[in-house]
Amino acid sequence: MDDVEFIHTHEWPAEEIVELYRAGGWWKEEYRKEGISRLLSGSFDLVIAYHRLEKRAVGMGRMISDGVSDGYIQDLVVLPHLRGRGIGGRMVKELAGYARKRGLVWIGLIAEEGSTDFYRELGFKVFNGTPMIYDPEGRG
């Protein structure tokens, strides 16, 4: 991991962010690349895993927050060819550390299927609650 630098920022080239969203399976073709800068600047924190040899972002994670008590980690992704090397775990630690230093006491996330053990090893636990999504038309 010596060739990866972890950068806290609120801006990054949109093309690289889109590539990461595609790697996570979250990018929809109807999304507009022009919205990326607003998405990043509106985040409480953004950590980019920058690969010095590849000269590009190979991972990212963001936190959204009220800035007072609660923070929510989302969009954590590492490009497939670099998964399993500790990059994702380091990004979670960077995000949580940043949040704790700013006084946040509740840090949560929704673990995608198959990733619960990854987050447990980083100090997260399952809590009694049900993630829900707004869907008034009943499409989901």
Image (cartoon, helix red, strand yellow):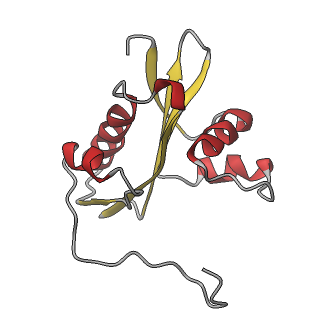
Q: Position of residue 82 (x, y in %)?
A: 47, 24
Residue at the image point whose x is 34% and y is 41% from the top: 92
Quarter residue 67 falls in = bottom left
Residue 68 can be seen, yes or no: no
Residue at the image point whose x is 57% and y is 41% from the top: 10
Q: Position of residue 122 (x, y in %)?
A: 22, 43
Residue at the image point whose x is 60% and y is 80% from the top: 140
Answer left or right for 104 relative to 73. Answer: left
- Where 115 sits versus 107, above or below? above
Q: Position of residue 116 (x, y in %)?
A: 29, 53
Q: Position of residue 49 (x, y in %)?
A: 48, 28
- Where 115 sits versus 70, above or below? above
Count the numbered circles shown: 0
Quarter residue 106 falls in = bottom left
- Where 62 sits versus 64, above or below? above
Q: Nearer the viewer, residue 117 or 122?
A: 117
